[in-house]
Image (cartoon, coloured by chain):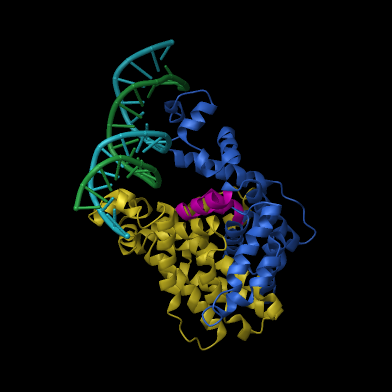
Chain colours: A blue, B yellow, C cyan, D green
DNA sequence: ACCTGAACACCGTTCAAGT
DNA sequence: ACCTGAACACCGTTCAAGT
């Protein structure tokens, strides 16, 4: 398990192969199949392990909102630290929508909802909305995004392209191009949570 | 392009291979590489084509909220119709966060925001939040989910498992197990949008 | 310009055989 | 019980050679 995560961290999604893993563990490829049913199960277990690690360090937030933000940011940071997680999180959740990953995220994000004043009957819809936002955001944001210096040029290119769109066909995207160039992912991520939370409290 | 989507629709993600496609087109595998750089580009183009198809039929909503809901549901239904799209949408967006898919969704969902009363300076954050919710929800929800009859047992199993969780460790998830069993994906999807929209109007 | 199809360097998985 | 490693049935991609 640890060796699998190591390989993924070192060289990305493509690096976790049966051959690479068995070499790293100084064993034969057949040996791996004695401990795990399939390569996908191993990958799912790796994802679960990393998510569990990110979400179990539960901080005692000052407010329920803080607790939700802390849990969400813990996941966000885990994806930033393990870039392969962005794609794999999405893959696992698509493949197994009610699996262990979903459970962990629901539990971490949903628990503070009672204290926010959400009626018990609305716990599921409310938590779902938060979880979906959170997963969508980490999927797009924290994944392949290159670091620091690279990042500026990266966003510049996208923003420039959007800036030159036909205003007739893509008026909205064109209008926000500058905001895209100047935004900060993590800040934006939190703003999104706050927006959803405002919808929640407005309803509750 | 059409042949690629056909293959995906018929037999899922795994069915789109160079060999299968070249056989379907009664040609050699090399011929495909004369028209496309790589298999991934082809897949990306397939995703873009389906998303474009889903989002261009723009309904003239009675209210901006209706327009947003309509665009979101168009995407939701496209994923339901092409189950492989759930995973591929996520994959493409992870791989190319500011690519054509993102652009299409932003444009469709963001355009009505002005009419909702969102300040121009907040268009990007606001649209991002909507888009992330929407992508997260379709990723988890509309993908592998089996149809009708199957679906009941599918959710029952998950709900039953959650029902038997240790209340000390997973109090929240355990508490919502029943709601999971009885929920309707599409309805829940719209409720989530409404929740986010409430956050938006509460801010604007 | 466009296509052919064998060849190459990979995959995941299986399984007789070993200890 | 656990491991070995060759073998199998696949992949995507390349490239000399054809039309």
Residue ID at (71%, 53%): A148
Which of the pair A186/A46 is nearer the observer?
Answer: A186
Residue B34 lies left or right of residue A21; in this view the side is: left
Residue ID at (49%, 55%): B91
Residue ID at (42%, 79%): B57
Q: Position of residue B175 (x, y in %)?
A: 59, 58
Above-or-below relation of B123 to A41: below
Residue A165, image quadrant: bottom right
Q: Can residue B164 be seen here? A: no
Q: Where is residue A164 in the image (x, y as percent from the top left)?
A: 58, 74
Above-or-below relation of B167 to A68: above
Q: Where is residue A112 in the image (x, y as percent from the top left)?
A: 69, 60
Magenta stretch in the rendered image: A85-106
Residue B192, image quadrant: bottom right
Which of the pair B156/B38 is nearer the observer?
Answer: B38
Magenta-drawn stretch, dominant element (helix, strand or loop): helix
């Amino acid at each position: 398990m640890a060796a699998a995560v190591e390989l993924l961290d070192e060289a990305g999604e493509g690096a976790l192969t049966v051959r690479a893993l068995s070499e790293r563990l100084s064993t034969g490829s057949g040996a791996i199949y004695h401990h795990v049913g399939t390569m996908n199960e191993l990958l799912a277990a790796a994802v679960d392990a990393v998510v569990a690690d990110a979400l179990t360090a539960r901080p005692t937030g000052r407010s329920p909102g803080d607790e939700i933000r802390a849990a969400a940011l813990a996941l966000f940071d885990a994806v930033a630290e393990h870039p392969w997680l962005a794609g794999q999180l999405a893959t696992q959740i698509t493949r197994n929508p009610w699996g262990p990953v979903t459970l962990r995220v629901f539990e971490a994000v949903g628990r503070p909802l009672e204290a926010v004043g959400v009626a018990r009957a609305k716990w599921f819809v409310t938590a779902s909305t938060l979880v979906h936002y959170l997963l969508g955001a980490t999927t797009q944001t924290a994944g392949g995004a290159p670091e620091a210096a690279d990042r500026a040029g990266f966003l510049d290119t996208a923003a420039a392209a959007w800036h030159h769109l036909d205003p007739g066909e893509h008026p909205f995207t064109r209008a926000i191009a500058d905001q895209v160039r100047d935004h900060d992912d993590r800040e934006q991520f939190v703003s999104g949570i706050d927006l959803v939370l405002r919808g929640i409290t407005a309803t509750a």
